Structure formats: C-alpha cells, structure tokens
Amino acid sequence: MMNTVTYEEIVEGKVTDLYFERTREILKKKGIKKRVRAEVMAKSLPDDWDWAVFAGLDEAFSLFKEVKGRGMDLNIRAIPEGSIFRPWNAVLEIEGDYADFCVYETAILGFLCQASGIATMAARCRLAAAEKMLLSFGGRRMHPAISPMIDRSAWIGGFDGVSIVTSAQRLGVKPSGTMPHGLVLVMGDTVEATKAFAEYFGSQAKVISLIDTIGDEKFEAVRVADALGKELFGVRLDTPASRRGDFERIIREVKWELSLRGHDNVGIYVSGGLGEYEIAKLIPFVDGFGMGTYLSSGRAIDFSMDIVEIEGKPMAKRGKYAGAKDLFHCPECYLTKSVPMGKRPFGYCECGGKWAKMTEEAIPGKFDVTVESARKRVMRAITTLRALT
C-alpha cells in the first residue's frame, strides 16, 4: 500500500484539516447557510524572492469542476496559471456557501503552494541560465506519486526537458536524459558504456557521456571524445561534493583539454546539487544543467485562504483587506497592483506602462489552464525581467 490518497478521497473532502470538518458540521446542524468570498494570497515569499510564479491551478480547477458537477454552486475567479505575482496579491477567489467548500481549503492550498514554489524555483534558474539547457531531474527526490506535478511545474517555469517518462508523456514531450553511473560501472569502462549508448540510442537521443564514474574527469572526457569523434554531443559531470574540490576549475580543465585536442564541438553539461547561484557562476563554461533536489524541494509558497466577504458585505479577519479584489500588472516591468473588484488602478505604472487586468472569471471553455499557455507567460516575463536586471 502506498502512502498516498486517492482522487476520490480529495473530492469527497476527506483530505482536510479536522477543524474544517467540525466547522462544516456545526454550520450544517445550525442550519447556517452564508455565501462568502474567500481569497488565496501570500503575505510574503520565501528567501529573497520579490516575485513568484503561480502554478497548481490545473489541479484546483479539476477539483472545482468535479464538485460543481456534483451540484455545488461555486463561482471561481483567478489569475492565469504562469502569471507573475507578488506578496499580498489575491491569486484565486472562491464564492459559495462556506459550509460547502471549507473542507477543500487544505487540498486547494496544497495544490497551489508546492507547485508555485517549484515553478518559481524553475523560473529563477531559467533567469540565471539565460538560454542554456535546463533539465528537470527532480522526480527522484520526492514521492514518485507527485513526479508529474514536479515536472509540470518545472516545465511551466521554463525548463527544456524532464527525465521522468510519465511526466514527459503527460506534457507531450520526449523525456530527456543521458546515462547513469550504474551503466558505466556494470560495463566497466566509460568509453565502452558511451559507445553502447551511441549504438542503441544514438539515433534517438544526443550522446552525452557521464565522465566522472571511474577516472579523472578531464582524462575520461578526452578518451570519450577521441573514441567517438563527432558522434559525441557532450560530456556530463555529476561529481559528488566529496570528490569535487573546485567544481568550476574541474569544468574549466575539461573544457581546456577538449579544446586543445580539437574537440570544441563537445558540450559541457553538469548536475548534482546545483542551484540558481551555482548556475550563475558556471554559466560561462557550461552548456546545460540538470537540476534535482534544488528544484523539487523548492520552498513552498505560503498561501492562505481567507474570507473577505459575507453575504455581499466586506468582512475579513484582522490583518487582511476586506472585499473582493482585482489584480492588475504592468506588462513592461511586472509590477502588480490590487484594487477593489470592478475598479482600475489610477494612472500608469511608475515605469510608464499601462495596467492590464489579470483576474478573470473561470468560465469553462474560456479560462485557459493549459500548460503551454502557462509556460509562455513565464517565458515572456523572464525575458522582461532579464532585461530589467
């Protein structure tokens, strides 16, 4: 038995905190039916982030569609998935009988918090890596049941490929990967393992040799490059920290030795415990990065869901702004501004750009929740943010 819940258990509201179950029971027994608006927002973002990427909406919408199909009267408004948001921005709003939907708060926040954190981490890595290749190797660092969510969020955040076969199938892309240390060890030689890979998969995938399994990286790189010639696309270094020393120096040595022998066409790819700051440091010498733990364990966005309106009247707990809100952003600099629903921000953004509305009614068939659209939003934002840094 796996320690995961079923989709049906989520839809039935069983994956909830106890106090929501008790709240629903009290309201039902008291006969209290009050229509409320509840919004999802984050008061702050992790670490030094001043912006984040909104993700996980596809799973939340799947839940909304299911419960509405079972007779629950809910109205949903949200910003599009893949949007850039900032602290105190309402990203999702639910309107309905609170006794009906309160038990889903736990699941909804879970969908959004983790996916948004991973998508944001992916986007920050994409910003640091510029046009260099980024591959998601994060599936192995988390429970396998959520590997498609991890890779989907990475793809939205701008990664070029994912290694998990199931994730790639769902995204409609080819899975990406090189070879494991296990292949080199079992075959007993880096060159022989690379030749075997080229023989059986060279027509399907780029031949990238893992060169840090048995011998010194620069000597193994030269051996493989000499043996395979133009058939070799690149070499990958996954050197563990215990053997690494100055990783940048090792990479530069490999690059030097290959170039010295006329192998300038061989790309350099790295993986193993790297993050956005390591990417920024290594980007002059590296053609692509494989990201694992740093990506999949990206800090979750601390979203909360709070009532802001009851029976049409603004009402919120202390520390929250009451009333329904619309979120606008400036496409020129990606600053955001919240205003009461139905109003527009005054004037122009401080950069001179025009405010564009983000909050939309989630009308079936009109609200776009496709992963392709979400990815395009992120990539457009990254292009703008890169130009501003």
Image (tube, helix red, strand yellow):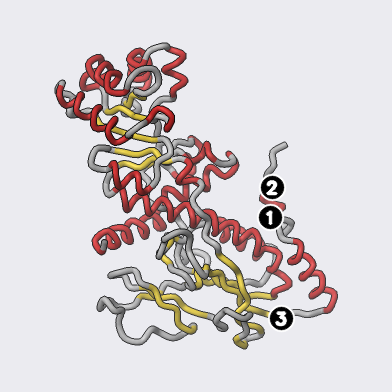
User: Residue 116: percent from the left, percent from the top?
Assistant: 49, 57
Res 5 label: 2
Q: Is residue 278 above or below residue 367?
A: above
Tally of numbered discs? 3
Amino acid, disc 2: Val
- Image-quadrant location for residue 378: bottom left
Residue located beneath label 3 in the image: 34
Label 3: few (<14), some (14–19) or many (≥20) C-alpha neighbours in 10 Å: some
Crowdedness near tag 2: few (<14), some (14–19) or many (≥20) residues, C-alpha within 10 Å? few
Which residue appears farthest toward the front when viewing the image? 245
Residue displayed at 27% across by 43% down: 283
* SS at badge 2: loop
Marks 1 and 2 in Cβ contact (< 8 Å): yes
First in sequence: mark 2 vs mark 3: 2
**Depicted 1 relative to depicted 52: above or below:** above
Distance from Cα at disc 3 to Cα at disc 1: 23 Å
**Residue 389: image tag:** none
Report the residue marked by disc 1: 10
- The residue shown at (57%, 56%) is 111
Q: Position of residue 203 (x, y in %)?
A: 32, 24
Tag 3: amino acid: Lys
Inspect the image, locate mark 1, and give the three-letter code of the amino acid beneath it: Ile
Quarter containing the C terminus: bottom left
3 or 1: tag closer to the N-terminus: 1
Task: Find the distance from the CA under tag 2 to the CA under tag 3.
Answer: 30 Å
Residue 183 in the figure: left or right of residue 204: right
Tag 3, which secondary structure?
Answer: loop
Q: Quadrant of the N terminus?
A: top right
Q: CA distance from mark 1 to mark 2?
A: 7 Å
